[in-house]
Image: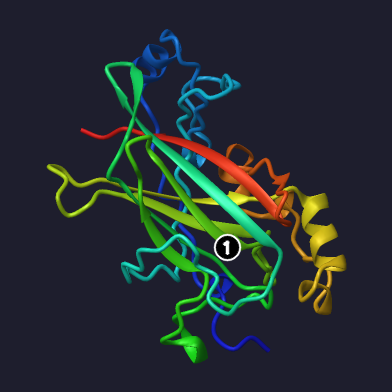
Amino acid sequence: MPAHPHPEDHPHEDLGHVLTRRQALGLFTTPFLLAFAGCHGRAEVPDATPLSGSCVVRPELTEGPFYLDADLLRSDIRDDRAGVPLALTFTVSRVVDGACEVLPGALVDVWHADASGDYSGVGSARGATYLRGSQETGADGAATFLTVYPGWYPGRAPHVHFKVRSSASAPRGYEFASQLFFDDALSEEVYTSATPYRERGAHDRPNARDGIYRRGGSQMLLALTERTAGGYQAAFDVALYVD
């Protein structure tokens, strides 16, 4: 029995938006090849494979019910949570006149479940802050978090929530929320072989059976590599339309 309600107890709504055909085609004529996925299954143009290191427009997916605007400005968000280390670097850009430029000063929020499938800050974990944190992107548009491989809970594929939002000093506000997903085979390996995940075993919902993943999650799939210090690392690029 979970210590507090899990997200599957709440309705999920797709919060994404669809570019107009003119906007999308304009992007594909730039030197940057942008990946695009429309929400609600209404993509205006076919998906494209992004060039290495290019600016990538990602699908916006549901934020989920457990976001807390706690302003925990920190890179290491593990607190006392055990698990396989995961170093996650976001590079945030904005699309300007059909091209991309890095976006410094954006706030990136990350939150996810621990190895037991529980979130901090809610239910019996109210007041706890594990596996939550925010970072401001630097001059290179990057923000890095040190966390652990997320745990799973019934009804959802393993995932990490994130949000990119404007700082209080930004001339205009903006916000983008989505979720990151993991290779099914890697998740099964972690959950069946690593402590403390193996106490619960493999997850019950692969990506293909996750309703949120099916709305564009294939473009939110992390490519993990092993770290020399142990665990995994991943880099994730996301571009926003910011007025």
**Above or below: residue 110 compared with residue 20:** below
Q: Position of residue 165 (x, y in %)?
A: 30, 50
**Which quadrant would residue 168 be assigned to in this image?**
bottom left
Q: Position of residue 161 (x, y in %)?
A: 50, 58
Circle 1 SS class = strand
Q: Position of residue 234 (x, y in %)?
A: 62, 44
Q: Position of residue 153 (x, y in %)?
A: 67, 72
Please, which residue is most extreme toward the front here? 229
**Above or below: residue 205 compared with residue 107:** below
The residue lying at 64 percent from left, 48 percent from top is 233
The residue lying at 33 percent from left, 71 percent from top is 70
Q: Quadrant of the N terminus?
A: bottom right
The residue lying at 82 percent from left, 68 percent from top is 194
The residue lying at 14 percent from left, 50 percent from top is 169
The amino acid sitting under disc 1 is: Thr
Colouring style? rainbow
Residue marked by disc 1: 147
> Front-most of 41 and 3?
3
Classify 10 Å Cα crowding around label 1: few (below 14), some (14-19), many (20 and above): many
